[in-house]
Amino acid sequence: MESRDRQSLTLPGWINYRNRHMGKYLEAKKRGAVDVPIVPLLDVINANPHYVTTSSCSGRVVLLATSRNEKKGESYFYGKWHRPVLFDEVWPLVESFRGEMLWFKVDPFILHVAADSLGAALHIISLARSAGIKIAGIQSADSEKYHVEIRGIDTVATPLYDGELLVGEGYVAALVRVANRKMVRNARRIARFFDAVSTGL
């Protein structure tokens, strides 16, 4: 920890940067705009002065409506859950959809963390790897911080509707079962990472 303390002094603006993002985090948490399942992990990381979280998602099951060219600005969530889902929540939405395309997706947790030094950035990456998280690395660096991305691997992406309904109830029921298994594994990855940072930061 001492080496990270010394290195942090070479990054002017870190304190202001950290205070700014801590303010955003605390305000978002107050408004209920932070995914509840990932809050304990965020709180542990943000309690350490060498780090601040800048964005996060705990993982989710989504029905994503898009145009056929899949432009981001033309997409929207037709359904979204940050937890395992029920078939009876998903199928009525699928059955009633009348847009261009509808996708069933599982997105894993993702976490962006700013660190005040290269040593601090490498340390939290090491903790992620020790918790079994394979995707963790430095995305960028500047005079204020090193930016780290950490994310899970539990994903699904399949079209359900393309001008017409492509699937039946049985297939959607199977997707829900797969999605829920992946959401459980995703939650376990978050829990293991929480344990790692709780003892290692």
Image (spheres, rainbow, N blue to C red):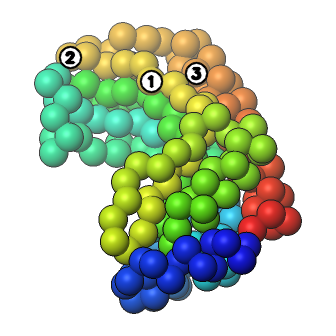
In the picture, the quarter occupied by the C terminus is bottom right
Q: Secondary structure beneath disc 1?
A: strand
Between 171 and 68, the one lying in front of the other is 68
Residue type, label 3: Leu
Q: Position of residue 80 (x, y in %)?
A: 46, 47
Q: Name the residue under label 3.
A: 175
Residue type, label 2: Gly
Using the numbered discs, state the Cα–Cα distance from disc 3 to disc 1 in whole angstroms. 10 Å
Q: Earlier in the sequence, mark 3 or mark 1?
A: 1
Q: Where is residue 168 in the image (x, y as percent from the top left)?
A: 48, 12
In the image: residue 175, left or right of residue 126: left
Where is 104 relative to 119, above or below?
above
Residue type, label 1: Ala
Q: Nearer the viewer, mark 2 or mark 1?
A: 1
Q: Which of marks 3 and 2 is in front?
A: 3
Q: Name the residue under label 1.
A: 157
Between 30 and 174, the one lying in front of the other is 30
The residue drawn where x is 71% and y is 77% is 2
In the image: residue 31, left or right of residue 193: left
The residue drawn where x is 58% and y is 21% is 175
In the picture, the quarter occupied by the N terminus is bottom right
| Mark number displayed over residue 163 | 2
Q: Earlier in the sequence, mark 2 or mark 1?
A: 1
Q: Where is residue 180 in the image (x, y as percent from the top left)?
A: 68, 33
Q: Residues within 10 Å of mark 3 (few under 14, many from 20)?
A: some
Q: Earlier in the sequence, mark 3 or mark 2?
A: 2
